[in-house]
Every structure is written in C-alpha cells, then in structure tokens.
Amino acid sequence: MPDARRTDAVLLVVALVWGSSYLSAQTATAALPVLLVLFARYALSAFACLGCLGPASVRRGPARLWTRDELRAGLPLGVTQAAVLLVETYGVAHTSAANAGLIISLTIVLTPLLDRSGHPGGLPPAFYAAAGLCVVAVALLMSGNGFHAPRSGDLLMLGAAVVRAAHVALVGRLTAGRAVRPLHLTTVQTVVGTALFLPLAARDLPTLVRADTATWLQLLYLALFCSVFAFLAQTWAVQRTSASRAGLLLGTEPIWAAAVGIALAGERFTLLTALGAALMVTGTYWGQTVERRHRDLAPVHRTEQEPACPSTTRTNA
C-alpha cells in the first residue's frame, strides 16, 4: 500500500475509533457509575502511557522524566481534559451515541472563536454563517421526534463541546514554541486525571472489581484504543500528511459515531435528526475550511504547534 494511502487509512481508523467511543462510554456507564468509568479509563491509560515510556524512563522520577515545560503545560491541561471527559461522559449517558458524536463536533467551529491569537484581523463572515448553520443543526438534533425541551444529555454534550474547545485553545497557548513531547505530555495528563478521579470514585472501587468481562472490555477499549492507540496513531499520521488533509479525515468522526450508533445500538434517525446530522457535518466542514484558508492567508505572528492530545478534533484521556 502506498504511503499516502496508508496514512489516510490510519487517520480514518482513528476517526472510526473515536466515533465508536461514544457507544462504548454509553455501554460502560450503564453498568458502572460515571465517575468510576472515568477513573478506570484514566488509570488504564496512564499505565499504558507509562509502559510506552519504558521502565527505565519511569524510574528516573518526575523531575527527570518530564521537562519543566511538559509539567507546566501538562498539569493544567490534565485538569481541563478531565473536565471535558467528565461533562462528555455524563452527556453520552443521557443521549444517543449518534447525537453525542454530532454535537461534540461543534468543537471544530467553537475553537477558533475562543482562540483568536491566530486570527488578528477577526474571522470572516462566512465562518459565522457556518457556525450559525451548526446551531440550527444542534436544534434539530435535540428535537428528536419533534420539537420539545432539549434532553439533559444533549445540553451536556453542548457544554462538553464548549469546554473541549477551551481546552484545545489552551493546549495551543501552553505548548506554542516549547519543546513538548506529545507522549510525555499525554502521560502527565492521564496521571493528573487518575489522581483527580480516584477520590471521587474510591467508594465505588469494589463495584469495579466485581464488574463483568463485557464491562472490562469496554473500559479497556476506551483506554487503550480510544485514548492511547488513537493518539499515537494520529501523531504518527499527522507527521506524514498535511494538516488540512488530516483535519478532513479526522472530521469524519461524527459520521462514524452516527453509523456505529445505528448499526450496533439500533438507534434510529427521524427526518429532523437526519437533517440536523447533514447540517452539522456541512457546517463543521464549511467552518473548518473557511478558518483554515483565513489562517493560511493571514500573517503568521507566532509558531503554532499541533495540540498534543487526542483532541485536535478530539480530547481523549
């Protein structure tokens, strides 16, 4: 397989894995408390990341394992990343996996609104038109079988999109122009997340021990595939293709989320939600394209570094 096709295939697999994570999280939270699911996901991810660094590296201790820049960025980013997954996981527990994946893709248009440093002249009107289209799409997705009060899960996913956008913008600010190794930064964040959720989930730990095999498989999938594998694969692929092409392929995540929800969970789209899904995909692609072209044409005032966690379009622990 040619290198370009191999790279594209890896990015599509990452998008598929991320898209499937909503159904896995929904299944896991049906069997275990949300906070316990988050602790287990973070702890498993942390052990996997530390394993990737190697025993010799871990034995050096924090002062020698991570640089000062990695610790300064990783500690606050670990807190904001935990906030993203907290709101997102509670949200997906109370809505459909398809809706969760589609609404969270609002991050693509929300991030440039929060991170104005790359757009000194302001964003063009077309970007705000794309954002408006996404707002209409969210309203249609929340309507379900007819217009009614939004479900709590949909509102939480909307909040998760806002928090994730703020997190991604913060990643850019804290890592720009600094020698930060992606794997090392991700490891700091997973350790921080584990420490944050441990006291919150401590009383439910016996429940985790008694969890059945199917639940453990979901947790392992969320931690090892949707977090560690997806991040490392994304980093490998982005280094071998353009940012624009990577963004386009990773942007198929909400499509995969909807497909997995329909195929495996029996979720059904009404006419309104199908229209909302189409508008959401159109709006996010349109907004991403407008923002990228505007950024490419604008004078570059600083060196921007790709967000070093699975959330350039995604923020997985």
Image (tube, grey):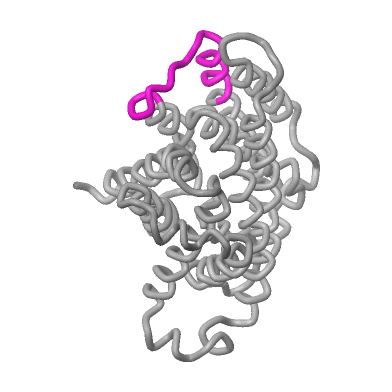
Q: Is residue 263 magenta?
A: yes
Quadrant of the image occupied by residue 257: top left
Q: What residue is drawn where x is 65% and y is 40%?
A: 161
User: Can residue 67 be seen by looking at this rendering?
Assistant: yes
Quadrant of the image occupied by residue 142: top right
Quadrant of the image occupied by residue 58: bottom left
The count of marks equals 0
Q: Nearer the viewer, residue 262 or 299?
A: 262
Q: What residue is drawn where x is 44% and y is 55%?
A: 227
What is the span of residues highlighted in magenta in the rendered image?
A: 262-280
Q: Nearer the viewer, residue 67 or 269?
A: 269
User: Can residue 246 be seen by looking at this rendering?
Assistant: no
Residue 199 place in picture, x, y as percent: 62, 66
Q: Would you place residue 282 above or below residue 223 in this image?
A: above
Residue 224 place in picture, x, y as percent: 38, 58
Q: Main secondary structure of the magenta part?
A: helix
Q: Is residue 194 magenta?
A: no
Residue 122 place in picture, x, y as percent: 79, 40
Q: What residue is drawn where x is 49% and y is 44%?
A: 29
Residue 19 place in picture, x, y as percent: 43, 38
